[in-house]
Image (cartoon, rainbow, N blue to C red):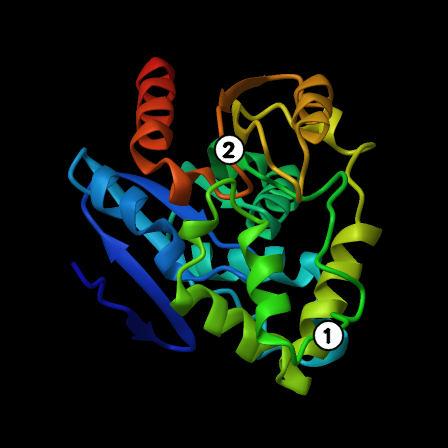
Amino acid sequence: MKLEIKNLKSYNYIEKGEGQVIILLHGLMGGLSNFKDVINFFSTKNYKVIIPELPIYSLPLKETTVTAFSDFLEVFIEYKKLNNVIILGNSLGGHIGLIFSNKNPNLVKSLVLTGSSGLYENSMGESYPKRENYDYIKRKTQEVFYNPDVATKEIVDEVFETVNNREKLVRTLAIAKSAIRHNMSKELPNIKTPTLLIWGENDLVTPPEVAIEFKSLLPNSELKWIKKCGHAPMMEYPREFNRILSNWLNQKK
């Protein structure tokens, strides 16, 4: 089922369902479609699921930082008149969720992180050597997942287009550097929001030790593992991901 993208004011976003609001935040190389199984599942379970398109390629270059994306989320939530939201972020999206929750604890009911940056991550390479080599980019994209078949031609084509578009590449690298600079180890103990960590045991981008460190630094967190799974559990094992998340949210009601 194709998800309808709404365009209001300067925001592009998907919104589906009615009830408790869950905001989904995609990663640097991710997009709205990464969460289609999460959207379709939770929008039928008394949740309103909203996924805004992050302004990765539209902010002025010097403002293209992780903090600026948290500010964008703050304005979006205010514009939509939302509060008491659940935030679910993958990779860069998790990092944005952490910064936002630290600054706006009164707006966040709970936080879900999967393959989140904020402590440490392996990037595909500082300057994407061999970026004009399609097979190289395909291999690097497949490494994000435990099962390489999850990296469909559509996903690989998108990454290939991004790294070979000079404007997009400059922004991608700027954001990656901003994320590395904004290490949150000192801030995490202040985040008291109930937090669920869902992690792939075979994540090469944010390896398992990152999840363990998040668990030790976030005072109100739980960690759940998914076997034979890489950096995007909601794409590789959507049923298992939705089951873990649904059970946890039901416990928190």
Residue at 68% x, 57% y: name it.
Answer: 66
Residue at (19%, 47%) from the top-left corner? Answer: 17
Q: Earlier in the sequence, mark 1 or mark 2?
A: 2
Residue at disc 2, secondary structure:
strand
Above or below, 240 relative to 153: above
Q: Is residue 244 above or below residue 86?
A: above
Residue 6, percent from left and from top = 28, 70
Residue type at mark 1 is Lys
Which is closer to the viewer, label 1 or label 2? 1
Q: How many marks?
A: 2
Q: Amino acid at mark 2?
A: Leu
* CA distance separating discs 1 and 2: 37 Å
Of the pair 157 and 52, the residue shown nearer to us: 157
Q: Return the residue nearer the eye: 246 or 231.
A: 231
Q: Is residue 83 visible?
A: no
Please give the residue where the numbered disc 2 appears in the rendered image.
Answer: 111
| The C terminus - image quarter | top left
Residue sitting at x 15%, y 39%:
44
- Residue 55 position within the rendered picture, expressed as x and y whole percent measured from the top left: 54, 71
User: Can residue 200 be seen by looking at this rendering?
Assistant: yes
**Given the current orientation, which residue lies at the most extreme top position?**
251
Q: For this view, does 131 lie left or right of residue 4?
A: right
Q: Is residue 245 left or right of residue 66?
A: left
Q: Is residue 202 above or below residue 155?
A: above
Q: Residues within 10 Å of mark 2 (few under 14, many from 20)?
A: many
Left or right: residue 42 versus residue 77 is: left
* Residue 190 horizontal/vertical position (percent): 72, 27
Residue 130 is marked as 1
Q: Residue at horizontal 56%, vertical 26%?
A: 193
| Residue 185 x/y as whole percent | 80, 33
